[in-house]
């Protein structure tokens, strides 16, 4: 059997997950990895290449890869994983009944955007103006920006969008946030931001902006706080879905799965560095704290 992983950056994590399920590369499975290396325009050609190899299952990481995979084939089973809303993007008919040849795991990051705004508001009690960093080239990031509007109104927060899709524009984006008198920053989920997380964390510290991120590795790199689904759950659950398909299940019959574990991570060293005191009620809810 031949399994393919299409991503913006190639990952070996799924290899470990499949070994745990009893697969041995070169014996009962062959892995084909293709990475766009942050060049979105390469994804359609990479998806077509994997389809021509007649792989048994195609795994797509994150929004652009999932869209490219679906556009490339209507017959090869596809399993996606990421933070986007697959119904809104037209990838599946519904979460319960995906239909077609595609299913997967979604954290639906847009649904978490409001929770992150709420946490920032609790952390910075005087917060009224907030910068939101999002990637206009990523449909999932655009969804999150759209879904941030209602919770922002409910929290009496004025959002200032910072649109960045090129690493050399980050510094200008932070300057724009400061000019707009933003008192904090929310970074939306995007693989482009994951790739450049250290630069984002450093710029937030440099500008003394309390920031919340979608993944804990930002906090591990020195970011203030993060809230999101467990980082390793998607790969475990997606690997199980691929295993079911390889054993005969049809994607149309496998409901799209969602997270069961969420994590709030706080870095007290960063809070001290930017002169911020984390309120006790927020700190008490943290799953992990860096001191």
Image (cartoon, grey):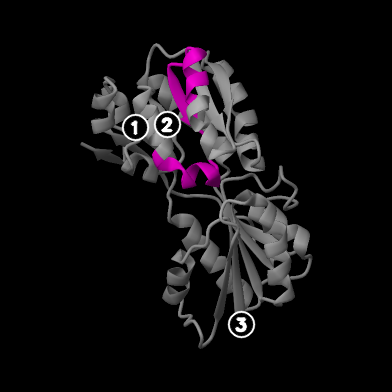
**Mark 2 surroundings: few (<14), some (14-19) or many (≥20) residues within 10 A:** many
What's the magenta region?
A: 174-198
Q: Residue at x 34, y 32 (%)?
A: 224
| Mark 1 and mark 3: Cα distance apart in space | 44 Å
- Which residue is under mark 2? 212
Q: Are marks 1 and 3 in contact (CB under 8 Å)?
A: no
Q: Label 2's element?
A: strand
- Which residue is under mark 3? 1
Q: Does the magenta stretch include residue 186?
A: yes
Q: Label 3's element?
A: loop
Q: Quadrant of residue 68?
A: bottom right
Residue at the extreme left: 291
**Mark 1 surroundings: few (<14), some (14-19) or many (≥20) residues within 10 A:** many
**Mark 3 surroundings: few (<14), some (14-19) or many (≥20) residues within 10 A:** few
What numbered label is drawn on residue 190?
none
Q: Label 1's element?
A: loop
Q: In this view, does 24 lie to the left or right of 94?
A: left
Q: Are marks 1 and 2 in contact (CB under 8 Å)?
A: yes
Looking at the picture, how far across and down is residue 48, in whole percent? 73, 66
| Mark 1 and mark 2: Cα distance apart in space | 6 Å
- Which residue is under mark 1? 224
Q: Quadrant of residue 146?
A: top right
Residue at the extreme bottom: 27
Q: Are marks 2 and 3 in contact (CB under 8 Å)?
A: no
Q: Which residue is drawn at 56% across and 56% down?
A: 37
Question: In this rendering, does residue 111 appear at all?
Answer: yes
């Amino acid at each position: 059997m031949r399994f393919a992983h299409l991503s913006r950056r190639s990952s070996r994590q799924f290899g470990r997950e499949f070994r745990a399920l009893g697969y041995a590369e070169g014996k009962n499975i062959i892995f084909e990895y293709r990475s766009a290396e942050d060049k979105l325009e390469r994804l359609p050609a990479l998806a077509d290449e994997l389809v021509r190899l007649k792989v048994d299952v195609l795994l797509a990481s994150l929004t652009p890869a999932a869209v490219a995979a679906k556009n490339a084939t209507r017959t090869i089973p596809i399993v996606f994983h990421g933070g986007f809303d697959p119904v809104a993007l037209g990838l599946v008919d519904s979460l319960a009944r995906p239909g077609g040849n595609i299913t997967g795991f979604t954290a639906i990051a847009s649904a978490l955007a409001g929770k992150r705004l709420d946490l920032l508001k609790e952390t910075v009690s005087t917060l009224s103006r907030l910068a939101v960093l999002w990637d206009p080239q990523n449909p999932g990031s655009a969804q999150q920006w759209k879904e941030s509007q209602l919770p922002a109104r409910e929290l009496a927060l004025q959002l200032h969008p910072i649109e960045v899709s090129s690493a050399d524009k980050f510094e200008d984006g932070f300057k724009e946030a400061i000019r707009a008198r933003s008192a904090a920053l929310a970074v939306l989920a995007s693989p482009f931001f994951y790739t450049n997380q250290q630069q984002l964390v450093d710029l937030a510290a440099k500008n003394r902006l309390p920031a919340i991120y979608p993944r804990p590795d930002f906090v591990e790199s020195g970011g203030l706080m993060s809230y999101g689904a467990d980082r390793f759950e998607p790969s475990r659950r997606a690997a199980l879905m691929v295993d079911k398909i390889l054993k005969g299940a049809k994607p149309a019959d496998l409901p799209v799965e969602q997270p069961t574990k969420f994590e709030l991570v706080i870095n007290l060293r960063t809070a001290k560095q930017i002169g911020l005191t984390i309120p006790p009620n927020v700190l008490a809810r943290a799953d992990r704290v860096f001191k």
